Amino acid sequence: MNQKVDLRKVKAEELKLIELDTVDINSEVPDFEPQRQYYFMAKCRQWVRKFEQKNGRLPSACVTNMGCQMNARDSEKLRGVLQEIGYAGTDSEDADFVIYNTCTVRENANLKVYGRLGVLHGYKKKNPDMKIALCGCMMQEPSMVEKLKKSYRFVDLVFGTHNLFKFAELLFTALASDRMIIDIWKDTDQIVEDLPIERKYPFKSGVNIMFGCNNFCSYCIVPYVRGRERSREPEDILRELRALAADGVTEVMLLGQNVNSYGKTLERPMTFAQLLREAEKTEGLSRIRFMTSHPKDLSDELIEVMAGSEKICRHLHLPLQSGSTRILKAMNRRYTKEQYVALAEKIRRAVPDIALTTDIIVGFPGETEEDFQETLEVVRTVRYDSAFTFLYSRRTGTPAAAMENQVPEDVMKDRFDRLLKEVQEISREMAERFTGTTQPVLAEERNRQMEGYVTGRLSYNHVVHFPGDASLIGKTVNVRLDECRGFYYMGHTV
Ligand code: SAH
Ligand code: SF4
Ligand code: F3S
């Protein structure tokens, strides 16, 4: 018999090279990470082999992400583990394993989950061996878990954001059990590196640079469900960038709730601008994006790095939330209307063609028509290339939820409609400034509506459709933007 591998003796960065079938699963379970998770992947792999013998096919798995870019990146980690184990990925929820990676930033994100669980229950009645799992931000709220325990007993596995790295171990436990497995951590300071990741796109990727958030904007639940801010070590991030580039990735998006405070908690502190300078040196990468920037922490050093960079995209997402200094104070955003506008102007001076985008909340408690008018005024002054607009959603446990004078729904909706009209008009006008120019475009996918067309993105983050075939996907090509149709362009390669 061949020599079996004892994972306790394998270095973290070499784990991905080990064939799971050769792992010695009779050795002691490693009590350190990530070796421990690879051990459980090997155990799950054995389960998959048995499933295959019995059913004559591989078990199928469907991962659904419901939240932000960080949630999407986490889903790629779940898919990475499932693929390593041997599951066949599918988009159909009528699968042997279904996992929802939930979001709870606004209430409607929440309601969606309960609706869809009902459908999953139907599938499970047909396929009793089906396993259903829930993870992500919503699971960090104790009331949600109580509700699942009481009314959704058919769910097999529930875990949160802090122990996502333990997915292989939890999955193994769930496969071997008929009970509902629940494992939620309140917080963590642990960051586990070197776990498998299955990217959605071969040519672009998100990269976490930090986790959690310490800002406690008074409306926001993220700090409660994602825990305290912690940065990854720069060496780990740069190593990941090099590995991605070697694997064909040309565009990366550096991810964090507030990237501008990157590095503050490191033993050897480093600024976000310094990290960008290092990231830029990665050979093979041609585009670097990042998200999200908090205006209060955006430094002159960062503006300087952006202005001088060939690789950093000409796009900055700078959430405004409100244009009223009074509301911004109640939101605990720690900048005034004037500071925000001055910052936007400073950025435009340094990088004149930059595309600015934003997030705005309408109907925060106590928002008056005057406050709302100030938001409109900032929108007209800054002139965003696009803006995500949200109706304020009351999140239990946040300071704003307990505030008096919540804004009535009809008032909120009326303001929302007026804001949307304004931002859309401005985006349309702003987009016109590139019409007739030729821009490098990263072709991302075949156009689903128009046969013979592909869709790509400019450095400015605008979308363009142009004639082309699948061979272009993942390549950067020069495209003339012939016509602007509001939020996107029609063009042709030159
Ligand atoms: N960390 C990022 C945003 C994360 S949440 C930042 O600081 O900008 C993404 C967006 O959701 C926020 O920018 C905000 O506009 C919106 N949002 C967060 N909580 C909300 C709530 N309770 N109601 C409505 N929108 C909310
Ligand atoms: Fe939420 Fe504010 Fe943190 Fe963004 S910075 S995640 S809005 S608390
Ligand atoms: Fe939602 Fe969690 Fe992201 S609440 S927006 S998935 S950090």
Image (spheres, rainbow, N blue to C red):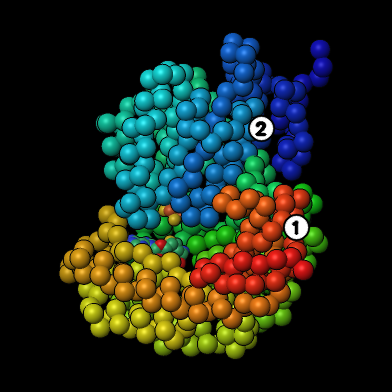
What element does badge 1 sit on?
A: loop
What element does badge 2 sit on?
A: helix
Q: Nearer the viewer, mark 2 or mark 1?
A: 1
Write down the quadrant of residue 391 in the picture: bottom left
**Where is residue 432 shown, x and y percent of the image?**
56, 78
Residue labelled with disc 2: 84
Specify the quadrant that holds the N terminus: top right
Write down the quadrant of residue 133 in the picture: top left
- Which label was assigned to residue 475? 1
Q: In the image, what residue occupies the spot 53% across and 54% down?
A: 70
**Vertical arrangement, residue 164 with respect to residue 318, above or below:** above
Instruction: Say if residue 345 shows up in the picture.
Output: yes
**Vertical arrangement, residue 445 with respect to residue 437, above or below:** above
Write down the quadrant of residue 444 in the picture: bottom right
**Where is residue 492 shown, x and y percent of the image?**
70, 66
Q: Residue type at mark 1?
A: Lys
Instruction: Say if residue 300 shows up in the picture.
Output: no
**Where is residue 292 shown, x and y percent of the image?**
52, 66
Q: Residues within 10 Å of mark 1 (few under 14, many from 20)?
A: some
Q: Nearer the viewer, residue 134 or 24?
A: 134
Q: In the image, what residue occupies the spot 72% across and 52% down?
A: 469
**Vertical arrangement, residue 465 with respect to residue 451, above or below:** below
Q: In the image, what residue occupies the spot 22% across and 78% down?
A: 368
Q: Residue type at mark 2?
A: Glu
Ligand 3 - quadrant of the structure image: bottom left
> Which numbered disc, 2 or 1, marks the residue that appears first in the sequence?
2
